């Protein structure tokens, strides 16, 4: 492995020659500006790019679901071992936290998610999923490769880093709340800031999109069982029809957003699942429905939750049915709203503009999608952004969770560079004010 001396000198020249290691670094604006450009040049070099592509493809071929990322985690640890990067494992079953730098403050974290989805890949290509019913259809394989790419660049500069970069490889983003489990393990005590990204086919390669404040919604899932009394479809008077009750429940739930929510406070209630009946001439005993609800504030979220339960149980009783509603938080934890910290937004904008040019920095509107990065951003100042990978010359890229999902691998150097640059510049610009600051070590982050 190992980088060429050329690279080391190349980056060091701009990063660190301006100040001795032991003093607080103050780089000129020009020197700071060049960090992301130099990282990007380097990440695009064939030896680094091909290595990241290879990692991504290996993970793509062997997708693993949330909290089952054992082989993925093993591959990551093997790469970290080879680079000589220390780490803590296991955290939240398969999660890994690596450390690069002094082992002391400031601590800045960069995060990748590792899990795949329970779906069949329909893309025919050399590195198609080898596991039936599982697919990396959200780009988390690329996220891992990017974070390892950043780790490789940062490790080369470890003796020059003024603080510690914390690498976070987390399990179970897709509904399992892996971020929350990692936080609960208590390994982020001294981390001052955390950055996360998601590849996106909505934006062109070489562009990024984000915003300050709320960027993704908070979400929850619910399921309801509506019980009636089954019987012959031609003699409804002897039955209590749960299908009719479920139909009215579904219609009534639509009123929560259209009639009860402030039109300027975005919310969603969607019934995405309905199961009941199996014959044309039989009224079933029960119907099961399920769905998701989303909101941008804690108040709206808990109001929705309460009203969903009331509407389902009361509306079902109008048709003489009994309904029970469950919000299975153990299996599907509620995800908080993802809120981007404003200071980190400014930091991100500077780094992104230096790397890609200000015109390639898009201000996005909040979206009702959700991310468990929100758990990190709730506990630590956090920043989440979308990294464009669309390129017409590579054909149309489908959105996440499509069985036809593809990643434009040209995006890998951009992701690695963002991670490495955001972290490096954060450390340079956030040195502790006094040397008497109590130092944490990576064991007690
Ligand atoms: Zn996803
Ligand atoms: Zn995702």
Image (cartoon, helix red, strand yellow):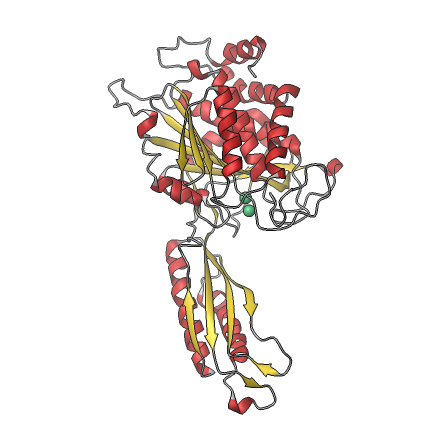
Please tell me which residue is depicted at 35% across the width and 34% down the height of the picture: 187
Name the residue nearer the viewer: 76 or 20: 76
Please tell me which residue lies in front, 379 or 276. Answer: 276
Instruction: Establish if 179 lies above or below 435.
Output: below
Q: Where does ligand 2 appear, by image quarter? A: top right
Number of numbered markers: 0
Q: Position of residue 223 (x, y in %)?
A: 47, 65
Q: What's the residue at 40%, 37% (across, down)? A: 91
Which residue shows up at 50% across the image and 65% down it?
A: 290
Q: Vertically, is 8 above or below 197?
A: above
Q: Which quarter of the picture shows residue 213?
A: top left
Q: Is residue 41 above or below residue 235?
A: above
Quadrant showing the N terminus: top right
Q: Position of residue 245 (x, y in %)?
A: 51, 78
Q: 349 or 392: nearer the eye?
A: 392
Which image quarter holds the C terminus? top left
Asked whether residue 32 is in view, the answer is no
Q: Position of residue 257 (x, y in %)?
A: 48, 65
Is residue 47 visible in the rendered image? The answer is yes
- 253 relative to 139 in the view: left or right: left
Q: Residue 418 appears at what percent x and percent y?
A: 53, 28
């Amino acid at each position: 492995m190992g980088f060429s001396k050329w690279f080391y000198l190349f980056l060091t020249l701009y990063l660190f020659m301006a100040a001795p290691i032991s003093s607080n670094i103050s780089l000129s604006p020009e020197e700071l500006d060049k960090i992301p450009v130099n990282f990007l040049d380097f990440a695009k070099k064939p030896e680094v790019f091909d290595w990241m592509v290879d990692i991504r493809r290996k993970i793509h071929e062997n997708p693993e679901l949330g909290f089952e990322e054992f082989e993925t985690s093993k591959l990551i640890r093997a790469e970290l071992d080879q680079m000589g990067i220390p780490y803590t494992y296991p955290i939240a079953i398969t999660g890994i936290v690596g450390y690069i730098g002094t082992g002391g403050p400031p601590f800045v974290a960069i995060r990748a998610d590792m899990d795949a989805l329970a779906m069949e890949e329909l893309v025919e290509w050399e590195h198609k999923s080898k596991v039936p019913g599982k697919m990396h259809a959200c780009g988390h394989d690329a996220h891992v490769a990017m974070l390892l790419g950043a780790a490789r660049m940062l490790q080369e500069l470890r003796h020059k880093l003024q603080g510690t970069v914390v690498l976070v490889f987390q399990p179970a983003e897709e509904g399992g709340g892996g971020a929350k489990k990692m936080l609960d393990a208590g390994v982020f005590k001294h981390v001052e800031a955390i950055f996360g990204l998601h590849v996106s086919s909505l934006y062109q390669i070489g562009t990024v999109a984000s915003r300050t404040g709320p960027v993704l919604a908070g979400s929850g899932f619910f399921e309801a069982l509506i019980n009636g009394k089954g019987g012959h479809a031609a003699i409804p008077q002897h039955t209590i029809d749960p299908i009719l009750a479920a139909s009215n429940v579904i219609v009534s739930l639509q009123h929560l957003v259209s009639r009860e929510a402030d039109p300027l406070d975005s919310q969603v209630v969607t019934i995405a699942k309905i199961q009941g009946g199996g014959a044309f001439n039989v009224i079933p005993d029960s119907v099961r429905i399920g769905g998701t609800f989303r909101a941008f504030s804690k108040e709206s979220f808990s109001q929705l939750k309460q009203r969903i339960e009331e509407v389902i149980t009361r509306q079902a009783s109008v048709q003489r049915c009994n309904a029970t509603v469950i919000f299975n938080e153990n299996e599907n934890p509620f995800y908080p709203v993802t809120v981007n910290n404003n200071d980190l937004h400014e930091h991100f904008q500077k780094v992104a503009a230096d790397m890609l040019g200000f015109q390639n920095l898009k201000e996005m509107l909040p979206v009702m999608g959700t991310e468990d990065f929100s758990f990190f951003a709730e506990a630590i100042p956090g920043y989440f952004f979308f990294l464009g990978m669309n390129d017409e010359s590579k054909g149309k890229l489908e959105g996440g969770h499509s069985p036809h999902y593809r990643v434009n691998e040209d995006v890998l150097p951009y992701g690695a560079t963002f991670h490495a640059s955001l972290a490096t510049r954060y450390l340079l610009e956030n040195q502790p004010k006094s040397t008497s600051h109590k130092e944490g070590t990576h064991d007690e982050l």
